[in-house]
Structures are given as structure tokens and as C-alpha cells.
Image (spheres, helix red, strand yellow):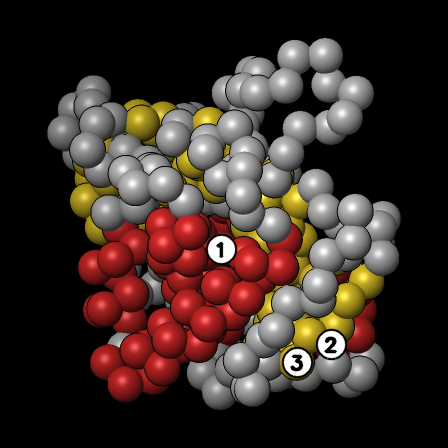
């Protein structure tokens, strides 16, 4: 199936790769080599999924640069919300799983050119992958084991290029918002889209190594998710940095 290439906003430069190349791996490698830089977006020509990696060159340290991760999810949720049927629920299962109507439909990734928290990274890469449709050889297409696709959730008319274009436009809007007003505006939109705000959820291992069950209260500027535990009412902090370093 041939699709036209996405048309990105003027500030973003698209760089397609063929299947099975990973846009995230390509972006990290070429950013580290100085071959690609700020606002370069590497994307896959796959028609069964959306797979992209956006490179940024922050002027703040790694700790603050990590705010681009919830910002990217907010842009993604906005873009899917605009394209999918009304009342489609787009949430983040902490720290990196995209949920559409409760089913797992994709992943987010993050990498930076340094692991020193108070150092400004030369580059960072935000990766997003979304399942558009089930594999042709899937005997039971649809949600299995908690998984789903854009097609199964009513987005059968959408294609890779439409979602790429929409995400890029919303991402630029949110970066401008962040530059003008700081993280507060991002937080307001992001935190309501994290699984566990309305009803309790189970979160990956906390500092003591055990899972945490509770309700989401907020996200600090230092990217610590605040969760009120069901068991004793205490508030636990879950580090995004640590969560992204853990195997998914």
C-alpha cells in the first residue's frame, strides 16, 4: 500500500526510513554523530504502525529537559483526540504505555546525550510507536491480552501520514506553550491523562522495589509522579528518570 509522505510544519524536517529500521535507533545514532539535530523527525514508512522519533536540542539541563516527555504525550493525546471518534479515551499507563480505550496501543521512549542530571544534553530523542492495525496473520484481530489498535478503536480511516502530521503540529504548539508559560500548562493537561487519576491503578516498582497501588495526585517539575497509596494513604514519589531506565 502506497501512502503519500507526511507534510510537516516548516520548522520540522522529516527523514523517512524503511521497515524494519527503527526511527528511534536511527535518530539516537545520527544525533550523537551530529548528522541530525533540533526538529529533525525520523519516521518509518510502515503502513501498519506509526513509528517516529523527534530530535530536540534543549538549552536546559537533563532534569528539566525530561519535561519534554510528558509534553510529547500531551501532544500525542491531543492529536489522537482530534482524529479519533468522539469520547475516545487516550491515556498513559505510567511510565511509557499508550492506552486507547483501555487497551495497550503503543509506547513512548526517551534518550538523551548525557545521563548527568545537571548537565545540558547536546541532544534528546522522543520516540513514539502506535499500532494502527493487527498483523495480517493474526488469527483473532482486535484486543488480545489487553492490546488494541487504532483501527479496532474506530480509527479505520486514519493512516500513518495523517497521525504524523497532526502530532508534529501539536508538538510545536505545546513547545511554544512550554517556552511561554513553563511546565504548569503542560502539567494541567498531562496529569488528567495518566491512568490512575480517576480510579486507583498499579504502578511499577517504587524505591523499595515493590509495586505501588493508588491514585495519581500530580507530577512535579522534577518529573516525580505523586501517588497516594491505597494501603496507608501515604504519598509516594515515582521517578520518571528511574522508570525510563528500567526494562519495559
Q: Assess whether mark 3 and mark 2 are in contact (beta carbons under 8 angstroms).
A: no
Q: Is residue 181 above or below residue 244?
A: below
Residue assigned mark 1:
241
Residue 229 rendering spot, x and y as whole percentages: 22, 29
In the rendered image, is residue 220 in sight?
yes
Residue assigned mark 2:
31
Residue 138 rendering spot, x and y as whole percentages: 73, 18
Q: Of label 1 and label 2, which has the lower sequence position?
A: 2
- For this view, does 213 lie left or right of residue 127? left
Q: Nearer the viewer, residue 174 or 47?
A: 47
Q: Secondary structure at mark 3?
A: strand
Q: Assess whether mark 1 and mark 3 are in contact (beta carbons under 8 angstroms).
A: no
Which numbered mark, 2 or 3, is in the foreground of this view?
3
- For this view, does 17 lie left or right of residue 88? right
Residue beneath the point at 57% across and 20% down: 142
Task: Quarter of the image for the C terminus: give it.
Answer: top right
State which quadrant residue 82 falls in. Answer: bottom left
Residue assigned mark 3:
13
Q: Residues within 10 Å of mark 3 (few under 14, many from 20)?
A: some
Structural distance between the alpha carbons of marks 1 and 2 = 20 Å
Q: Nearer the viewer, residue 153 or 213?
A: 153
Structural distance between the alpha carbons of marks 2 and 3 = 14 Å
Q: Nearer the viewer, residue 203 or 88?
A: 88
Q: Secondary structure at mark 1?
A: helix
Q: Of label 2 and label 3, which has the lower sequence position?
A: 3
Structural distance between the alpha carbons of marks 3 and 1 = 28 Å
In the rendered image, is residue 27 in sight?
no
Outermost residue to the top: 139
Residue beneath the point at 41% across and 62% down: 75
Amino acid at each position: 500500500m502506497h501512502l503519500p509522505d507526511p507534510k510537516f510544519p516548516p520548522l520540522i524536517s522529516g527523514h523517512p526510513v524503511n521497515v524494519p529500521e527503527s526511527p528511534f535507533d536511527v535518530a539516537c545514532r545520527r544525533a550523537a554523530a551530529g548528522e541530525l539535530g533540533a526538529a529533525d523527525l525520523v519516521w518509518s514508512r510502515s503502513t501498519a504502525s506509526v513509528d517516529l522519533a523527534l530530535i530536540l536540542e534543549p538549552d536546559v539541563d537533563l532534569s528539566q529537559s525530561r519535561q519534554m516527555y510528558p509534553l510529547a504525550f500531551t501532544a500525542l493525546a491531543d492529536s489522537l483526540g482530534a482524529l479519533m471518534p468522539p469520547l475516545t479515551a487516550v491515556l498513559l499507563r505510567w511510565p511509557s504505555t499508550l492506552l486507547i480505550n483501555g487497551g495497550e496501543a503503543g509506547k513512548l521512549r526517551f534518550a538523551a546525550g548525557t545521563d548527568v542530571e545537571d548537565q545540558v544534553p547536546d541532544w534528546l530523542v522522543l520516540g513514539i510507536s502506535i499500532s494502527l492495525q493487527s498483523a495480517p496473520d493474526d488469527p483473532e484481530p482486535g484486543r488480545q491480552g489487553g492490546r488494541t489498535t487504532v483501527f479496532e478503536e474506530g480509527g479505520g480511516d486514519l493512516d500513518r501520514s495523517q497521525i504524523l502530521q497532526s502530532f508534529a503540529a501539536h508538538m510545536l504548539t505545546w513547545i511554544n506553550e512550554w517556552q511561554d508559560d513553563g511546565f504548569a500548562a503542560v502539567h494541567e493537561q498531562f496529569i488528567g491523562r495518566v491512568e490512575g487519576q480517576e480510579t486507583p491503578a498499579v504502578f511499577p516498582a517504587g524505591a523499595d522495589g515493590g509495586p505501588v497501588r493508588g491514585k495519581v495526585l500530580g507530577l512535579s517539575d522534577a518529573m516525580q509522579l505523586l501517588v497516594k497509596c491505597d494501603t496507608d494513604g501515604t504519598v509516594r514519589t515515582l521517578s520518571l528518570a528511574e522508570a525510563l531506565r528500567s526494562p519495559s
